[in-house]
Amino acid sequence: MNNNNSLLPVEKDINTDSYLIFGIKEQQYAVNIKNVVEVIPLSVIEVQKNAPMGVIGIFNYKGILIKAVDICPFIGIVTENFNIDTKLIVLNVNGNCFALCAQFILNIISIDNKNILPVPFYSDSAIINNVYKDDLNYVNLIDSDVINNLITVNSQNENKINYLELLPKDESSLKILQERNLNNQKQNEKYSFDLDISSYTRFVLFCVADYNYYIDLKYVREFTYLKRHAITKLPYTQDFVKGIINYKGEFLLVIDLNGFLNGDSSDDKNKKLIIIEGRNYNIAFCVDEIKSINNINKNDILTHNAEQSKYVSGEFIENNTLFSILNVEKILSDERIYINIE
């Protein structure tokens, strides 16, 4: 391999869309990534009486009150108790913001529209009218526009669920939720949230070893698990170059980011892969954990001293914690990741 290829983000195929996959009760659902603002942990939700079906209540999101939505009533399954691990997927649909509750976040995938199948019975009020089948499971595609319409226009179907009984009530959980809510209030002083989100950039937060990093979502194609793929080792490469994998018919070079950045590679098969997309070929970053998708105001990104690390393009401080934003282009153009036959 050589490093003369252009590794800037590619323009997406017009026939392909990226989706965020999340889970409820072992079932997989997906929302179009273009509508996803960010993924945040459960915070304090004020339950509303006489709310439309599926609306749990409202919570403070960066200075605006938005609805927290439970999709279970719309798909005919029983809503289970929420807990501090519950995720809120914040969506922006035609200028209206609301959040879907999810038990866990699974993946980001690119789906070719020709592989999307209609469900047998179409309905204008159904939030699922299409499905996608991957190698292992069926993924139900959520129509965010339908949900937006149901929770803003249709108020005839009132909630029959007592969400107060389903939200966390134990002392330790309430303390955590209050801390998250307090942090959100602090952000309110800092953020002026613009619904067109033009002043914000979405980042993927992940960790390697004891370090937390962000990368711009525009570089991310998909997530997957390392253990699902056979790795072929390459000769004349650095220790952090784990090898290549065949991913959906494409060969990807797998880079252990901890080894690349900190000099400490490992063979842990439980790691995850962030597939980075370039114009001429693809590469995968091997990381310990993918934590969330966050929306960050560009004005809050601090300039980084390039002398400290040329692989960091900026820094972001939240809750007195410093997060480094990786310079993907610098990493992908580094000569150390290519085969050296000298």
Image: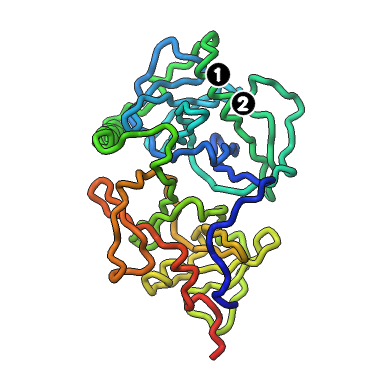
Asked which secondary structure carries label 2, the reply is: loop
Amino acid type of the residue that numbered disc 1 sits on in the rendered structure: Leu
Scheme of image coloration: rainbow
Name the N-terminal-most of marks 2 and 1: 2
Q: Looking at the image, can residue 338 be seen?
A: yes
Q: CA distance from mark 2 to mark 1?
A: 9 Å
Amino acid type of the residue that numbered disc 2 sits on in the rendered structure: Ile
Q: Are dots 2 and 1 in contact, CB under 8 Å?
A: yes
* Residue 14 placement, left or right of 182: right
x, y percentage for residue 181? 29, 32
Q: Residues within 10 Å of mark 2 (few under 14, many from 20)?
A: many
x, y percentage for residue 122? 73, 24
Q: Is residue 114 above or below residue 207?
A: above
Q: Residues within 10 Å of mark 1 (few under 14, many from 20)?
A: many
Q: Which residue is mark 2?
A: 127
Q: Which residue is mark 1?
A: 150
Q: Looking at the image, can residue 172 be seen?
A: no
